[in-house]
């Protein structure tokens, strides 16, 4: 409904083996597959690692979504709200069992959802007053109407673990769910072995087993694909993607997705608390050059925060973000900055020096950070780059030490983007959104979007949000994202999910 043209991006790749393979090796490959991505599974807790767990189909949500972003049944077969919109009832699927043989029911669903609601995350942004177990149902009471609730229950942090997975404190400590694959060995944070769950309530996978490896270095992932040690590899760096395009044994695919590479700015920082300062930093960014030289997808240069793949959230009427270093220097001069002896700007005895935090899991980020160092130095801003685990960004948000962060944000973590946007730009901001910035007009517009099912009212409110973010720049867009994947020849029925909710393991098989 909200994610335009995703049906055109949905790629179902069926390929046949083009080379002779020894019979024994081929027979082994036909029942198993190895998946590699950058994302560690650091915990069995969905609140911590749900985005990685969900992709591997161990645990499931009450509400699911297809690759076009349309909601569909998951562990709930249907749902409805009362006339006043304050009570939602979710009817649970019958006959579902967890991997340990225990029964899925309303009690364990309510336990998981209440825990998710009590933790920081997308569900905590909903106006929920209670989540209770009914007879084969989950009942959610609200303070006010909130039409987007079903979409939030499709978020990865709301997947349902088995009661037997919980430790003495009620924290999930094992990967036990209801999904089509069950975990046979978990070596956190990098490796997981899994097997088909033959008692799965839905269609049983064609693969008997699968392996998952989190490989942080892009070079490693590309080499695993090239050598044949990995069958499905996600998030390739531009050099690896280009090289694999010449390898006969693999197929390479790039899919535009609703993700943006952006700078999170601490708008309460004395150097950054004026919108003119943030605009100056934006004007200094050569987005076209970054798209050409680093991401190598020229069409990915961002003219606004929300990518075209995000449908109604992408506003083609907005004045596009531009590159103009001279205009940037003029704005900074208005703010009282002047060049020091080493060409770094000075004001009241302080150098315009900032720390940028980023992480290597997405291989283009450190390269973009290095480009920003050069581009900002050209207008007199000194940038120190720190590359570490991605957790340094939310940690810096919480303790107030973050100045600038570079990351990639998926705005379709919930099928209705309002779930993510509300988390990032609602009151108080969010770990991966606004910091030190708040707009009452935006907060009110987000509430209208979340509570209304009227398309015209939503469109008007979405326009206000998009235009305010374009003007105020609490987050500075740099590029839109291309999801790069390599697929071993012979692996068929591979679905590249533009919402990045699943690796599609339950669908794939080997050509015979």
Image: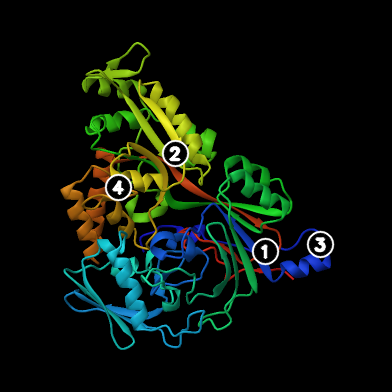
Say which label, 3 or 2, has the lower sequence index: 3
Say which label, 1 or 4, has the lower sequence index: 4
Helix, strand or loop at mark 3:
loop
Residue named by callout 3: 21
Image side of residue 239 versus residue 471, left or right: right
Say which label, 2 or 1, has the lower sequence index: 2
| Whether residue 396 is situated above or below residue 340 in the rendered picture | below
Residue displayed at 23% across by 31% down: 270
Residue named by callout 4: 398
Residue 17 seen in the current view: yes
Measured as percent of width and height from the top left, residue 129 is found at 20, 71
| Label ID, residue 48 | none
| Whether residue 335 is situated above or below residue 440 in the rendered picture | above
The C terminus is located in which quarter?
bottom right
Q: Residue 249 sits in which quadrant?
A: bottom right
Residue 286 seen in the current view: no
Identify which residue, 220 or 423, lies in the foreground: 220
The N terminus is located in which quarter?
bottom left
Q: What is the CA distance from the residue labelled 2 to the residue labelled 4? A: 30 Å
Q: What is the CA distance from the residue labelled 1 to the residue labelled 3? A: 14 Å
Residue named by callout 1: 491
């Amino acid at each position: 409904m909200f994610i335009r043209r995703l049906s055109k991006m949905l790629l179902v790749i069926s390929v046949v083996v083009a080379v002779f393979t020894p019979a024994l090796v081929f027979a082994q490959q036909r029942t198993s597959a190895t998946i590699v991505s950058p994302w560690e599974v650091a915990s069995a807790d969905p609140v911590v690692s749900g985005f990685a767990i969900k992709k591997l189909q161990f645990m499931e949500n009450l509400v699911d979504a297809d690759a076009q972003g349309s909601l569909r049944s998951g562990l709930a077969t249907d749902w409805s709200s009362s006339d006043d919109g304050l009570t939602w009832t979710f009817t649970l699927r019958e006959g579902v069992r967890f991997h340990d043989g225990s029964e899925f029911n309303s009690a364990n669903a309510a336990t998981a959802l209440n825990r998710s609601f009590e933790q920081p995350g997308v569900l905590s942004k909903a106006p929920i007053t209670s989540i209770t177990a009914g007879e084969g149902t989950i009942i959610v009471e609200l303070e006010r109407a909130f039409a987007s609730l079903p979409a939030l229950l499709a978020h990865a942090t709301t997947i349902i673990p088995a009661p037997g997975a919980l430790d003495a404190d009620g924290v999930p400590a094992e990967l036990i769910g209801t999904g089509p694959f069950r975990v046979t060995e978990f070596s956190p944070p990098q490796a997981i072995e899994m097997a088909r769950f033959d008692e799965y309530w839905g269609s049983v996978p064609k693969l008997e087993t699968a392996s998952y490896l989190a490989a942080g270095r892009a070079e490693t992932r590309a080499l695993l694909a090239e050598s044949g040690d990995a069958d499905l590899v996600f998030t390739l760096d531009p050099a690896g993607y280009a090289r694999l395009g010449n390898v006969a044994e693999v197929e390479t695919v790039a899919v535009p997705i609703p993700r943006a590479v952006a700078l999170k700015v601490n708008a309460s920082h004395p150097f950054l608390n004026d919108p003119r300062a943030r605009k100056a930093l934006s004007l200094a960014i050569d987005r076209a050059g970054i798209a050409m030289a680093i991401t190598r997808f020229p069409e990915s240069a961002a003219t606004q925060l929300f990518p075209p793949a995000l449908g109604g959230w992408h506003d083609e009427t907005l004045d596009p973000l531009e590159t103009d270093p001279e205009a940037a220097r003029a704005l900074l001069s208005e703010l009282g900055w002047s060049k020091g002896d080493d060409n770094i700007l000075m004001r009241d005895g302080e150098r315009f020096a900032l720390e940028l935090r980023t992480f290597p899991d997405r291989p283009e980020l450190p390269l973009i950070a290095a480009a920003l160092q050069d581009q900002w130095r050209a207008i007199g801003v000194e940038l120190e780059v720190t590359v570490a685990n991605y957790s340094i960004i939310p940690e810096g948000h919480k303790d107030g030490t973050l100045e600038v962060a570079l990351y990639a944000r998926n705005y379709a973590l919930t099928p209705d983007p309002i779930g993510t946007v509300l988390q990032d730009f609602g009151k108080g901001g969010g770990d991966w959104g606004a910091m030190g910035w708040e707009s009452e007009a935006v907060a009110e517009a987000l509430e209208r979007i979340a509570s209304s099912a009227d398309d015209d009212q939503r469109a008007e409110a979405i326009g206000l949000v998009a235009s305010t973010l374009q003007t105020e720049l609490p987050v500075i867009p740099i590029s839109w994202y291309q999801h790069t994947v390599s697929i071993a020849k012979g692996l068929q029925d591979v679905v590249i999910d533009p919402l990045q909710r699943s690796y599609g393991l339950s669908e794939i098989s080997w050509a015979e």
